[in-house]
C-alpha cells in the first residue's frame, strides 16, 4: 500500500497511537511535524490537537499534488462534479453556497455519510475536485471551548503577573523585596522559597561589598527588585549605584530625558524611572560610602561612541549624572576571595 493510500485512511478523532497503526511510527512523526511542512510532499495537512491527542481535521489537496487515483471516502482529486455526485450521492452544496465560484474560484460542497463520524468537505475548482477535507463533527463546539479555555488561561496569567508586580508600589525596601520574592514565579520555574531565602539573606547581609557583587551579577530577567533594594540602602557604595546605573541600559533611555510622557508604558517606563531614581539620589548626595573602584571613563567612552548627533550629545549631557564619567579609586569586590564573597556567589547560583 502506498503512503498516499495509507494517508487516505486517516480520520478525525484518531489518536497518535491510531495513526501509528495506519502509517507506522516514522510516517506518523513526519505527518505531525508541522515545522517540516510534510504536506508539500504528501499533499495532506493533518491538523492534530496535542491537548486532546486526536486529529481535528484533515485536508487532501491538489495544490501539493495528492494523487488523483487515491480515493478519500470514495472521492478523488480531479473528479468532475458529476462523478463526485455519482460516487457520493448525499453530497450537497455547503450552507451559504449558491453554486457560483467564490473569490478563489472554488465552490464548496458538504456531505455527512452515515458511515463516517465526520463532516466531509469538497472544494471544486474549474469543474474538478481540488480539495477534500474531513472535520470532526463537534469541531465548532471544540473551537469555542478552546477559545474560552485560552481566555481563562490568559486572564489567570494576567492576574498572576499583576500580583507579581505589586512589589513595585511598595515604598519600604524590605517589604518590597520580600513581596517580589514571594511572587517571583511568573518569571521562573524555581520555587518562590529560593527567592525568599535569597531576599532574607540579602537583607541580613550588612556588607556593601557583598551588595556590590549581588547587584553587578544579578540576572535582570527576574526584574530589578534586587538592584532597587540595594541602591536604596544608605550604606550602598557610590560605585555600586553607578555600576547599576550603567547595567540598566541608560544608552537606550537617555533620549527621553526631557519627555517622560512619550515613553511606552510598562517595563520601559519602569526602567526609565529606575535610572531617574539613581540620578536623583546621586544629585542629593545620598551615597556617602566610596570604597569600591569605578571606571566611569571607560563606561562613558562606550556611550560617547554612540552619540552621533549634537542633539544626542545634549540629551546625554542632561541625562547622565556628573559622577558617571569619573574614575574612583578603591578595591574591586568582584576579585575578592573572601568567605563573604564566596557565600554571595553560592547563594546567587541558587536563583540566577
Image (tube, rainbow, N blue to C red):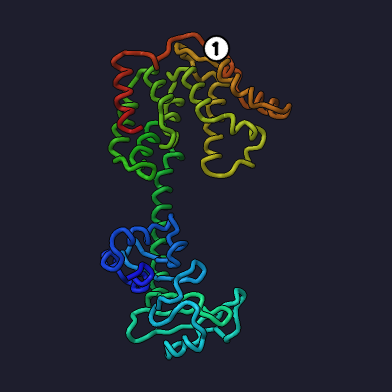
Q: Can you say whether 254 is above or below 157 in the image?
A: above
Viewer-nearest residue: 270 or 118:
118
**Residue 100 placement (x, y as % from top left):** 60, 84
Residue at 72%, 28% in the rendered image: 309
Q: Can you say whether 39 is above or below 178 in the image?
A: below
Q: Which residue is mark 1?
A: 327
Secondary structure beneath dot 1 equals strand
Q: Could you tell me if residue 302 is visible in this image? A: yes
Within the image, what quadrant is residue 154 found in?
Answer: bottom left
**Residue 345 placement (x, y as % from top left):** 33, 23
Viewer-nearest residue: 80 or 212:
80
Within the image, what quadrant is residue 72 found in?
Answer: bottom left
Residue at 66%, 23% in the rendered image: 317
Disc 1: CA contacts within 10 A as few (<14), some (14-19) or many (>=20): some
Q: Quadrant of the N terminus?
A: bottom left
198 sits left or right of 220 in the view = left
**Residue 272 placement (x, y as % from top left):** 56, 34
Q: Quadrant of the C terminus?
A: top left
Amino acid at each position: 500500500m502506498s503512503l498516499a493510500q495509507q494517508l487516505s485512511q486517516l480520520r478525525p478523532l484518531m489518536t497518535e497511537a491510531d495513526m501509528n497503526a495506519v502509517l507506522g511510527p516514522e510516517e506518523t512523526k513526519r505527518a505531525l511535524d508541522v515545522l517540516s511542512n510534510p504536506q508539500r510532499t504528501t499533499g495532506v495537512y493533518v491538523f492534530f490537537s496535542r491537548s486532546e491527542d486526536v486529529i481535528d481535521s484533515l485536508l487532501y489537496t491538489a495544490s501539493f499534488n495528492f494523487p488523483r487515483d487515491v480515493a478519500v471516502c470514495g472521492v478523488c482529486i480531479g473528479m468532475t462534479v458529476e462523478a463526485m455526485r455519482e460516487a457520493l450521492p448525499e453530497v450537497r452544496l455547503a450552507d451559504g453556497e449558491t453554486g457560483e465560484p467564490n473569490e478563489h474560484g472554488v465552490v464548496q460542497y458538504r456531505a455527512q455519510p452515515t458511515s463516517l463520524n465526520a463532516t466531509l468537505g469538497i472544494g471544486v475548482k474549474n469543474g474538478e475536485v481540488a480539495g477534500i477535507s474531513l472535520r470532526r463533527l463537534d469541531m465548532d463546539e471544540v473551537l469555542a471551548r478552546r477559545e474560552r479555555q485560552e481566555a481563562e488561561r490568559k486572564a489567570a496569567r494576567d492576574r498572576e503577573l499583576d500580583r507579581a508586580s505589586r512589589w513595585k508600589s511598595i515604598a519600604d525596601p524590605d517589604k518590597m523585596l520580600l513581596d517580589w520574592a514571594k511572587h517571583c514565579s511568573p518569571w521562573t520555574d524555581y520555587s518562590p522559597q529560593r527567592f525568599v531565602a535569597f531576599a532574607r539573606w540579602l537583607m541580613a547581609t550588612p556588607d556593601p561589598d557583598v551588595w556590590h557583587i549581588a547587584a553587578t551579577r544579578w540576572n535582570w530577567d527576574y526584574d530589578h527588585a534586587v538592584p532597587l533594594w540595594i541602591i536604596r540602602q544608605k550604606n550602598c557604595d557610590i560605585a555600586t549605584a553607578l555600576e547599576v546605573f550603567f547595567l540598566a541600559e541608560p544608552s537606550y533611555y537617555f533620549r527621553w530625558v526631557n519627555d517622560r510622557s512619550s515613553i511606552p508604558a510598562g517595563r520601559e517606563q519602569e526602567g526609565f524611572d529606575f535610572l531617574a531614581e539613581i540620578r536623583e539620589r546621586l544629585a542629593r548626595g545620598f551615597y556617602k560610602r566610596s570604597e569600591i573602584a569605578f571606571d566611569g571613563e571607560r563606561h562613558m567612552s562606550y556611550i560617547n561612541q554612540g552619540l552621533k548627533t549634537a542633539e544626542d550629545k545634549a540629551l546625554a549631557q542632561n541625562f547622565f549624572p556628573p559622577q558617571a564619567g569619573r574614575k574612583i579609586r578603591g578595591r574591586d569586590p568582584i576579585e575578592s576571595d573572601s568567605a563573604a564573597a564566596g557565600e554571595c556567589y553560592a547563594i546567587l547560583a541558587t536563583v540566577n
